[in-house]
Each structure stands twice: as C-alpha cells, then as structure tokens.
Image (tube, rainbow, N blue to C red):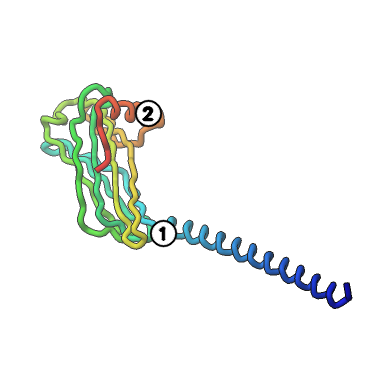
Amino acid sequence: MSFSDKFTKWSSIIATLGTCILAITATITVTVTLNAWKVDRESSRPYLSLQESPKVQLKSGLQLEFKFTNVGIHPAVNLASRTVLFAQRLEATPVHNEPNYLVNEIPQNMNSSLVIVLDSYEVDVKEIEVEPYYVVLYLEYFDPIINQHYSQTLYYKWNGIDQGEVQPIVHVERKEKEKILEYFKVQNIKLDL
C-alpha cells in the first residue's frame, strides 16, 4: 500500500469522524433548543392567581368574592369554573355546586372576579355561630396562542362566624385536602366541566 493510498484512507476516516462529531453536535444543539423553547412556552402560559385575600360579605345571605389576576404572559380565554361549598364536618351534600362561564378574554395583569352568592336558607348568616365551610374552586381556561388547555384546583376553608365575628377564608392544609378528596369520592362529586 502506497503512501497516497494510506493518506487517502486516513483522510477518509478523519473526514467521516468529523462528520459524525458534527452530526452529534447538531443533534444535541437541536435537542437543547427544543427543550428551551418548550420551557419558554410554558413560562408564558396564562396563570390565574389570587392577588388579594378572598372577601366574605354578609348581606341577605353569604357572598364570597375571589379576585383573580392573569399573572401569565398569554391571555386566558373561555374561563370556566366550578365552585363547591360544603360544611367542614363532611357529612351533608354540598350547599353549592355550580359551574360559571366567562366569555371575555383575560389578558396579562387583568383582574376578574368570581362572586358566589348563597341565600340565607343555604347558609344562615344571621346566627351568632356558623360552622366552617370548605370552598373548592376548579378553573379551566384556554391559551389561544399555543392552543393549550389548563386547569387549576384551589382549596380553601371559610371559618364561618364565631361569636358574631365573620372569619376569613384561608388555605386548607394537606390533611384537609385528603379528606376533601375522599368526601368527593363518597358524594360522587366531579369537578370537571
């Protein structure tokens, strides 16, 4: 084998190895870029967050107001919610289990309120003592930019009325959430819309 044949053979091997290394590098670059794009896309999604503590008002009945803000970059459209309100003792059926639908778009940093109004026969707020209630909010909305549906479930507890004093709405603890989920199974409550 002559020198030129050896040179050609080694040149071919080196060229093939170089091409393989470039192909692997290009594949890694494409993979990293796609992963970064997916992360960026998810971080731009709409996300509804409570910016204020929920408000409790007593009028002719009980009124609970939840003010949401879209803290994401993309708008949220077709917002649908289901609100389930039930006594903390987890024995009776819910006093409120209704869906709500919002037709307007919620752009970035825009507020939207969900107000739940219960008549006095559902929760008697004229009493000095009213037992605590759980409030579960299930939200569904759509991102029109990336054509993706999202959902959130929020678990709260209204501590009722104690000695004539209206108590605030607070977040539930993990153990309470587990009890709520078991209650939903027993009562055959579905949150989806």
**Residue ID at (33%, 41%):** 153
Residue 193 falls left or right of residue 23: left
**Residue ID at (68%, 69%):** 19
Q: Mark 2 belongs to which amino acid?
A: Glu
Residue at which label 2 appears: 178
* Residue toward you, 137 or 13: 13
Could you tell me which quadrant the C terminus lies in?
Answer: top left
* Residue toward you, 58 or 178: 178
Image coords of residue 162 (percent x, y)? 25, 27
Alpha-carbon span between mark 1 and mark 2: 31 Å
Image coords of residue 39 (percent x, y)? 48, 56
Q: Quadrant of residue 13?
A: bottom right
* Residue toward you, 70 or 10: 10
**Residue ID at (59%, 62%):** 27
- For the view shown, which residue lies furthest in the right direction? 2
Residue at which label 1 appears: 44
Image coords of residue 24 (percent x, y)? 64, 62
Q: Mark 1 belongs to which amino acid?
A: Ser
